[in-house]
Image: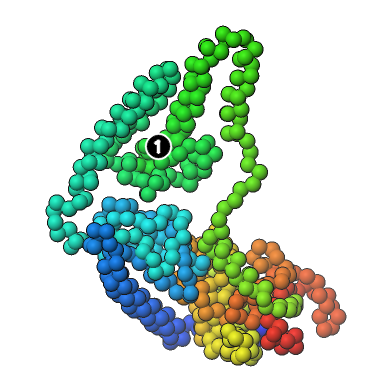
Amino acid sequence: FVKMFRHSSGRCLTIFRCRQLFSTSASSLQPAHLTSHARSSIQIKAATEKRIEFKRAAGSSSAQVGGGNANLKPFLLADVGEGIAEVEVLQWFVKEGDYVKEFDRVCEVQSDKATLEITSRFEGNIEKLNYQKGDTAKVGQPLLFIRPAGAFTHPPSPVPPSAVPAATSTPAPPTAPAALNTSRSTQVAAPPPQPSHPSAETQGTPSYPPSLVGNKALAAPAVRRMAKELGVDLSKIAGTGRQGRVTKEDLLSRHEATSAQPQLVHTTPDPPLPSPSSSSLSPTTPPVHSTSSPTPTPQLERREPIKGLRRAMIKTMTAATSVPHFGYNDEFAMDLLTRLRDELKPFAEKRGLKLTYLPLLVKAASIALKSYPIINSSLSQDVSEIIYKKHHNIGVAMDTPQGLIVPNIKNVEERTVLDIAQDLVRLQKLAMEGKLGTDDLSGGTFTISNIGSIGGTYASPILMPGELGICALGKIRVVPRYDKDGSLRPVRLMPVSFSADHRIIDGATM
């Protein structure tokens, strides 16, 4: 297989060139575009049918929501495919009380393989959000409850009365702090920070309190981190930002007000203490410093939950440990392939593409897989059969801000080099944005990892589940080598590392 791979990336590519691997004619490009268009049409149709199916399921389960809320409809989290049972809620585009139309964005979720935007299947008011940002939502369970637009049949519904007491109950909270202030008459300096909050609420009553999602205030991640370090509860701060968000200035002003409060409170009990003796003051002053000292203490460790693509990588690598790997390293002479790449660059530039070595090597791997179909196969679940795959869906490992991800290029055996290059650009863009779909991430048959792009040479690549072979491409280097005549000349060499499933693939085959 490696011999065929090397041969395909060298002499074979120069022989076939544009005839088999690269075609600029419209007839050769037409089938690839038609197949991708047909595939997208099938995906849209399947998604529409799944939407209709879940709309019926949500309608049938709405009768199960009791407690006087028979008009509420549960918004079920649809099955995202690939056996995924749960997703992480990245962000909400709506809040309780908002009015949404059909196909409006509701939230963004991330599964183990992709990031998805969930759109509304109903039109009406959001009554309840079942999850907060960062929570894990289960497939088939309600994301939220919505009151459809046609459900408001009675004008004097329970909603307006609940809104009226909320407005009339707002004068009550100011009386409570007033009572607290009278009870704490000994604390002369404690009342000033407290009137600032009722005044902020009375000036902006309609905007800030509704910005809370459940009991969690709206704030940027940097503000939340700072609040955690300062020990300030964001839910008790009236935000002055957009849609009532708590800004950095709000947090700092709140912290300054609360930090000044204990200093003044401790000054009032101090006068009674001098009466016993001056020595009694010395034991009482250290506790004042001890209460403020824990704030700047450095944290020796930090923990964060494993979610999203990182959790998927852990599952993948854990599953790979059950497969007996064997490795094989070699070197590819890249001089002929470099010459071919230089010849094809002008054609790629006409299509707005920057042609790299990777599309050529992906095509060369497909030619080798055609000669050795055993490497393009997989094992059945009960390890009783070898499943030979018709198409070469070659995955390319990509390093993204979310973690390692391996989308694959479908039907490489039927595509031209420039089609492969164009699909690589599309996959890289979606991967960096975190918007790869399940179709791009599933169905791979062979994987290529380009560690040479970051300066690597040799590696021990780990097999993807369901695949029998993987290779890692190293950095191309110019090194001295002897030719057949014994003359020393510079040669472009690329180190290549292979791994295979030793249960099926033996060393001679590789």
- State the residue in front, 400 or 335: 400
x and y percent of residue 300 in the render? 66, 43
Color theme of the render? rainbow
Camera-side residue: 58 or 495? 58
Q: Nearer the viewer, residue 170 or 284?
A: 284
The secondary structure type at the circle numbered 1 is loop
Label 1 neighbour load within 10 Å: few <14, some 14-19, many 20+: many
* Residue 478 appears in the figure: yes
Which residue position is annotated with label 1? 237
Q: Position of residue 236 (x, y in %)?
A: 40, 37
Rendered position, 82 above or below 201: below
Compared with residue 132, is residue 456 higher up or lower down, i.e. above or below? Answer: below
**In this orientation, which residue lies closer to the viewer: 119 or 280?**
280
- Hey, which quadrant is residue 26 in on the image? bottom left
The residue shown at (50%, 78%) is 419
Outermost front residue: 276
Residue 1, given in percent of the width and then of the height, sits at 69, 86
Task: Using the image, determine if residue 207 lies above or below residue 314.
Answer: above
The three-letter code of the residue at mark 1 reads Ile
At 58% from the left and 29% from the top, the residue drawn is 291
Is residue 106 left or right of 278 when viewed as pictured?
left
In this rendering, the answer to whether 102 lies above or below 156 is: below
Name the image quarter holding residue 281: top right
Residue pictured at 44% horizontal, 32% vertical: 254
**Furthest-right residue in this view:** 486
Res 333 seen here? no
Residue drawn at point x = 64 percent, y = 16 percent: 282
Instruction: Quarter of the image for the C terminus: give it.
Output: bottom right
